[in-house]
Amino acid sequence: MKKLLLSVAVATALAVAAPVAQAASTTANFNVTVNLTSKCEVTAGPTDVAFTYTSFQVGASTATGGAFGVRCTNTLPYTMSLDATSGTVIGLAYTLGLSASSGTGAGLTGASYSVTGNMAAGQSGDCATTALCSGTQARVLTVSY
């Protein structure tokens, strides 16, 4: 029995003295790179700018319409311009403007602006009939960023 106990004691001692496998780890660093191409877009409009005018009108006429939206990459500065700020349609001179000439991108929210228009009083206009005359002139809005 002494031999058996001695064998068990030796086996236990060897098991305890055996090296224990330890978990090990190592680390490595890496970078995450994001390449963003900034952009702006006109999200709505601009709607048509319309004047209602009567020959020799005493007061100036203000246009209706012209609403548009701009959406740009967050914090991206941009400017807006028109290809011309004045013109003549059916003999009536008008001027155009923008509610703002620049802005800063607000991401998904975007911003609302408008093309404004004025027509001076006292103009005659060109119309060869007694019916309502109308004319159209195309204009271009540019958003630069």
Image: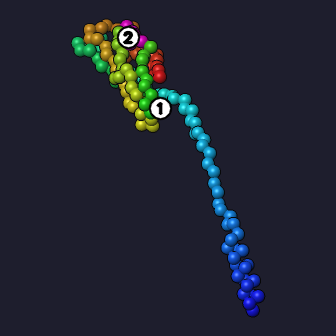
Image coords of residue 4 (percent x, y): 75, 88
Q: CA distance from mark 2 to mark 1?
A: 31 Å
Any magenta on residue 86? yes
Residue 55 falls in which quadrant of the image? top left
Q: Which mark is residue 133?
A: none
> Total number of numbered labels?
2
- Of all residues shown, which one is farthest toward the bottom? 1
Residue type of the residue flagged with mark 1: Thr
| First-in-chain label (2 vs 1) | 1
Residue positioned 54% across, 32% down in the render: 36
Residue identified by numbered label 2: 86
Q: Does 40 sit left or right of 125 as displayed? A: right
Residue at image position (39%, 9%) is 88
Q: Is residue 127 visible?
A: no
Q: Foreground residue, 42 or 128?
A: 42
Residue 16, how many percent across, how many down? 67, 73
Q: Amino acid at mark 2?
A: Ser
Segment tinted magenta in the rendering: 84-91
Quadrant that contains the N terminus: bottom right
Q: Residues within 10 Å of mark 2 (few under 14, many from 20)?
A: some
Q: Which residue is mark 1?
A: 73
Residue 75 visible to the viewer? yes
Residue 140 is left or right of residue 125, and the answer is: right
Image vertical order of residue 130 relative to residue 36, above or below:
above
